[in-house]
Image (cartoon, coloured by chain):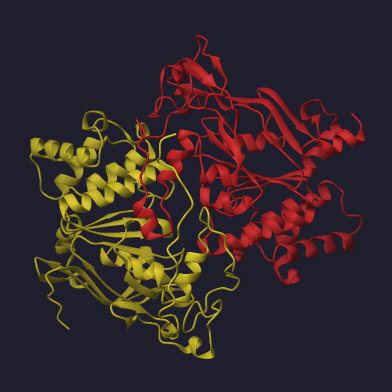
Amino acid sequence: MIVNDQSTVLSVRDLEVSFATSLGLVNAVRRVSFDVKRKQIFGLIGESGSGKTTTALAITRLLPAYAVVKGAVTFYEQGTPIEVLKLSEKQLRDYRWRHVSLVFQGAMNSLNPVLTVREHFKDTARAHGINDGKKIEALARELLTSVRLNPDRVLNAYQHQLSGGMKQRVMIALALMLRPELLILDEPTTALDALTQRQILDLVKELRDKYEMSVILITHDLSVIADTADEVLVLYSGTPMEMGDINEIFYEPLSPYTQMLIDSFPMIGRVVKERPQMLKTASSVGCPFATNCPLATQACFGADMYLKPIKGSHMSSCIHADQLVGKIRAYQEGGRSGGDQA
Amino acid sequence: MTEERLRESPTVSSEHLTVTFEAKKGLFSRVYFNAVDDVSIAIERGSTLALVGESGSGKTTLGKTLIGLRKPTSGRVYFHGKDVWSMRKEEFMEFRMKSQIIHQDPYSSLNPYKSVYDVLALPLRAHRLAGSKEEEREAIYKMLEEVGLIPAEFYADKYPFELSGGQRQRVSIARAMLLQPELVVADEPITMLDASLRLGILDTMMALQRKMDLSMLFITHDLGMAYYITGRTGKIAVMYLGSIVEFGPSEKVLKNPMHPYTKALLSAIPEPDPKLSRSKQLMKLTRMDPPDPSRAPAGCKFSDRCPFAFDRCRKERPKLSNAGDEEVACFLYPDVQGTPVSGES
């Protein structure tokens, strides 16, 4: 299969990740396929253990050696495919940062406490062969300004002198150093307060436009996805449940799991009538949601879980997805004001 | 005080409650700031107060002070109208038994070396509430079932590491409820849990609350969660740098906020609905970064970030005052009183 669509930046096909443990192989990610297009914010949503971070680590080849990775990850450099899973260590160095950058979860704690922000920039630049001090300084200043930080104040600061939101912005600026075509952000707003979270989300959209890059946004928070993503992949227990355009996912979900996720998000002005119940643990065979699903039948426990197109480009792995087509969820007219003058 | 009066007074209330913290700045200098600053609130029997605010606003400190885990620097805490810190020892023990807390992190609040049964038996034994082994077992099994850990015999023998986060939090709830408390402080009890489990835990708590006629202080930074837990009848208090800036019925506060800080928060939170979330207009503050609690402005603490601040806001500190159906501490509302700022900040 050759996809040479100019607009596709990253293509993941039938990605499987399993870990060898004392209890045998544990499947962390099963048959995940998706494409990230140019200038797109691609949302990866899932709860803990859904495999969202593992997927990101597989894309950047950062999984430990005992992980068994199958499938294909293809990065398109100006349309020329690069098979990521086949890259040598030396080639990987070029691929990471230059093509794809990853900002880890808890980025607030990933700055080195004994280095200033300036030294972080220098380190990163030198590791990638940029040795011109003036050039590094200019680049650092430009990037810090683009994440709305004051370079004069931040460059000489150590991490303990910065707030959580500032640290997150420094990490994003660092990740942009080599102008990657794809930026992966793992839970970028978790543990930040509401006003800081808003700034980071707006910044992500702004940087996407400014640098014309693609973003994979990983989160467990449905509202962050609703606010920011163009396309969404929903993962549960390592299994792809549904994928589609942001509006398709929210207003006509084709997986009972996604419906449950939306229903369990408390929202001001919304009274939850039917409370979703998640009492049982995920099923280890077939569809992982089958044990809790209102639509489950015996067939679900033997279902082959991979994404199939159901309605246009909207895909679902649910074998009962056709029953859900046309069940439109109302646009939530949240009864709030805010923003208006007192 | 007569029995009658005791029954009428709120389960817990505070008067000008202040808790001062000391922070070191450099080697020799110290700064003092009020983590809880002149807070007067009351929670009536059977009702829920949601306390919202961002990290560092003093929510947890207020919660702990209300149940006697921390002594106030000044001001008073009353339990059924009785001053907690002038109680006799037996009265104080009774107060501590009747006021319980559910902690945020179910992964660190349960002793990993004790089975669920032992975790739950400990408070019963400490307060000598069970007359016999049989009574103890019965009480524990019954509570496990109440919090949805069924069959109880199965879960009683488990150790925390064998349980999921949601199940652990159910054990924490059972532990708090076993002593038949009258007041429960729930400190972000669902923040660490997966979205799909959260409502189930909240429903369990709300059912127990109704059944036991509990008063509850629900601490959260999530406004949607605060709306859910307070339902149609509960109240909400918005905290900023140790002070309550807005207080009232949650329907009112969350749908028609008065204080600029509440408005800014509501305008900033993303919504689980793409069209709604993307159509929201952010209220711009003069400074978006969170403040340093030890450097709060002298007048209104929000005056350095508030786009509406005027002269009076920097010279006087607004008092939480009645304004319509709510209480608000902001000089944009004509009925709000203030206290002039003295030399200190």
Which hue belongs to chain A? yellow
Determine which quarter of the picture holds residue A56: bottom left
- Which colour is chain B painted? red
Q: Quick check: B46 above or below B288?
A: below
Q: Position of residue B58 (x, y in %)?
A: 56, 34
B63 above or below B297?
A: below
Tell me if I can see residue B315 in this picture. yes
Q: Residue at (82%, 52%) from the top-left corner?
A: B124
Which of these two is toward me, B71 or A193? A193
Q: Residue at x 85, y 31 (%)?
A: B89
Extreme-top residue of the structure: B343
B327 relative position to A316: left or right? right
Q: So how many labels did they put on this image?
A: 0
Residue A328 lies in quadrant: bottom left
Left or right: where B124 falls relative to B151: right
Q: Position of residue B2 (x, y in %)?
A: 92, 31
Is A27 on the left or on the right of B61, as rendered?
Answer: left
A229, above or below B24, in the image: below
- Quarter of the picture holding the N terminus of chain B: top right
In percent of width and height, residue A308 lies at: 33, 83
Residue B114 in view of the camera: no
Question: Taking B86 as reference, is A298 left or right?
Answer: left
Q: In the figure, residue A72 lies in which quadrant?
A: bottom left
Q: Residue at x 79, y 65 (%)?
A: B141
* Residue B204 image point, x, y percent: 67, 60
